[in-house]
């Protein structure tokens, strides 16, 4: 059967699901750049905060030096837990700020304790939570300039910046932080990773 004939039969079939009603489907599938970014960062950072709280309790209960977890690495050439959390926060902050047309705030890289990391997450959540959703409108077509004035300078459209760069980078570091703690015996699971949704 030819592809055209097959797709035609699907399009006119009353049981073909959304293929039969593309305008209605498109209306329901409209997703703003704000909705695709800030709530995702909020959910995962809140979950990461909970995972870190469990890790701190784990260290206290088993009389483990907190630094053993905080400075743990999956492999010698990878960043430790503290830096993984910092970078996750940095991506949530910078991606949200750039899409909203705001300056990216700078934070010191000095987090050494669980309390420091919780403070970093709280500051990130406060910043992105205050961004006006209306500022994200049209950001899918906005040009984002990364690493200006350096050999790695790059210009990228807002939608590609969020979906192909920002979110994957963010999830990489959140996932690595989770994996580090799970690998070191902290009793956490997928529910802890996902958080409330």
Image (spheres, grey):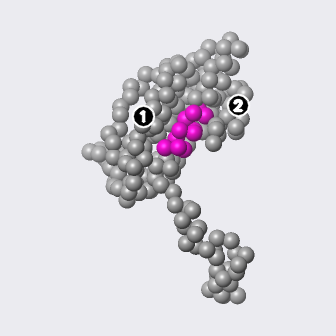
Position in image of residue 151 (x %, y %): 31, 47
Q: Quadrant of residue 28?
A: bottom right
Q: Main secondary structure of the magenta part?
A: helix
* Lateral position of residue 160 relative to residue 54, left or right: left
Position in image of residue 167 (x %, y %): 51, 47
Q: Which mark is residue 127?
A: 1
- State whether residue 51 is above or below residue 29: above
Q: Residue at x 35, y 51 (%)?
A: 144
Q: Residue at x 57, y 18 (%)?
A: 67
Q: Give the CA distance from mark 2 to mark 1.
A: 28 Å
Asked if the magenta segment contains residue 46, the reply would be yes
Assess disc 1: are there few (<14), some (14-19) or many (≥20) residues with their C-alpha within 10 Å of its C-alpha.
some
Secondary structure at numbered mark 1: helix
- State whether residue 133 is above or below residue 71: below
Residue carrying label 2: 188
Q: Is residue 87 visible?
A: no
Of 100 and 28, the residue lying toward us: 28
Q: Quadrant of the C terminus?
A: top right
Outermost residue on the left side: it is: 149
Q: Quadrant of residue 114?
A: top right
Position in image of residue 94 (x %, y %): 40, 40
**Residues rendered magenta in the picture:** 38-48
Of 112 and 95, the residue lying toward us: 95
Q: Earlier in the sequence, mark 2 or mark 1?
A: 1
């Amino acid at each position: 059967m030819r592809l055209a004939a097959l797709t035609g039969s699907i399009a006119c079939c009353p049981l073909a699901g959304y293929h039969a009603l593309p305008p209605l489907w498109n209306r329901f599938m409209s997703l703003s750049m704000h909705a695709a970014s800030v709530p995702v960062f909020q959910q995962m950072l809140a979950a990461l905060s909970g995972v870190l709280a469990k890790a701190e309790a784990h260290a206290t209960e088993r009389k483990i030096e907190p630094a053993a977890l905080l400075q743990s690495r999956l492999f010698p050439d990878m960043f430790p837990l503290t830096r993984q959390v910092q970078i996750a926060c940095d991506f949530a902050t910078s991606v949200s700020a750039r899409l909203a047309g705001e300056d990216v705030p700078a934070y010191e890289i000095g987090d050494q304790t669980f309390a420091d990391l919780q403070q970093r997450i709280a500051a990130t959540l406060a910043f992105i939570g205050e961004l006006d959703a209306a500022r994200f409108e049209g950001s899918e077509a906005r040009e984002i300039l990364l690493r200006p004035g350096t050999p790695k300078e790059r210009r990228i459209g807002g939608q590609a910046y969020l979906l192909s760069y920002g979110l994957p980078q963010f999830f990489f570091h959140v996932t690595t932080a989770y994996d580090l703690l799970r690998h070191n015996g902290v009793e956490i699971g997928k529910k802890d990773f996902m958080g409330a949704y």
